[in-house]
Amino acid sequence: MILVGDVGGTKTRLAIFKAEKPLHCLHEKSFSSQNYQGLGLIIKEFLKDHPFEGDVACFGVAGPVRANRIQATNLPWIIDAKELEKDLSLKKVHLINDLKANAWGLRSLEEKEFALINEGEKHEGNAALVSAGTGLGEAGLYWDGKTHLPFACEGGHTDFGPRNDLEVELYSYLRNKYGHVSWERVVSGPGIYELYEFLIQTGKEKRTIEFPDKGKAPKIISEKGADESDSACVRALHWFISLYGAEAGNAALKFLSLGGVYIGGGIAPKIIEVIKKDALQGVNSFKKSFSNKGRMKDLLEQMPIKIVLNEKTALLGAFEFAFMQEGY
């Protein structure tokens, strides 16, 4: 057996797989990350109900992994593989970035588990994965001539680049609040709320909704934006989608993703129909923002773009990575 996990700022998923192909999941459970003080506590609770007859584990965690140790980006947790090995009596614990886990998981998915946004052209080459959720994660998939080999990066924390006067104003608004303004500040669940609040605070839209629980605000804004029942929500959601496309195009250029661009995370599958629209309330659509890169426009238009629909892709990828590393 192999114990695997997908550790995010909102939820942590754990599962036990048989160490064999094809994949066979024996047990799986989700936990609210915010309700625990560390990953070890969640694992111990999980294993009380689901006995584990194995000695290898792999966890995908949001944040940069260094020396098999990680300070989670959106959680007050420090996760150390050596400590987990000792506490859980395991031979080997692998810690990998959550987007790297997601990228490894892509090879386990069937075509029906993707939604096509741009058909593009089929080429061998690198690929990219860009995922907006609690934060903004990015990963590259290096093409070695036979297969894609995923690698992690922290591209979501690079400097946000305004594209027009409105976004220059947005940049100043966010800089005054946070100092550094990254792409994650605008392309993420919290980013949707920031866009909405900017529109309200600057008088560009009128507030008709109150959010007693700010954590639920992005979901409400997305829903009311998708069904077009609130003007401010519509504008914020469409703007978010345009920014998402722009940053996905940035990643595609940096990784020269001729092999395709994958859009992961929990937000995109819920707003697919809005993403597919060509005209978005006076802002560029996802596809237009993706390819609107001057002389690189034609290159980007040739890249396939797919939304990942399987929310368990990171779990599958943690298994794939451990299975490969341990030589099963």
Image: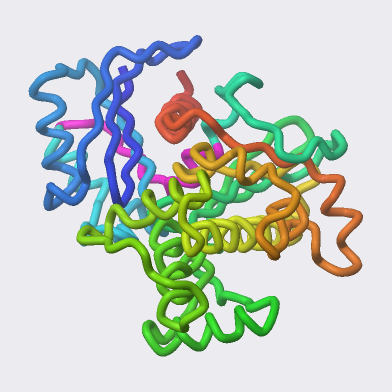
With respect to residue 57, does 157 lie above or below?
below
Quarter of the image with the N terminus is top left
Is residue 90 on the magenta stretch? yes
Residue 182, x across and y down, in percent: 50, 73
Task: Identify the residue shown where x is 38% and y is 42%.
Answer: 60
What's the magenta region? 89-103
Give the image's coloring scheme.
rainbow
Query: Is 290 left or right of 157, judged from the image as shown?
Result: right
Between 202 and 82, the residue placed more toward the observer is 202
Pick whichever, 236 or 13, lies toward us.
Answer: 236
Residue 28 % position (x, y): 27, 22
Residue 61 magenta-highlighted: no
Residue 52 vertical position relative to residue 257 in the rendered view, above or below: above
Visible in this render: residue 65? Answer: no
Residue drawn at x 55%, y 72% as measured from the top left:
158
Q: Quadrant of residue 27?
A: top left
Which of the pair 185/37 is nearer the observer? 185
Residue 49 at x, y percent in the picture: 11, 19
Percent x, y for residue 276? 68, 42
Asked if one can make out residue 64 in the rendered structure from this viewpoint, the answer is yes
Q: Is residue 234 above or below residue 157?
A: above
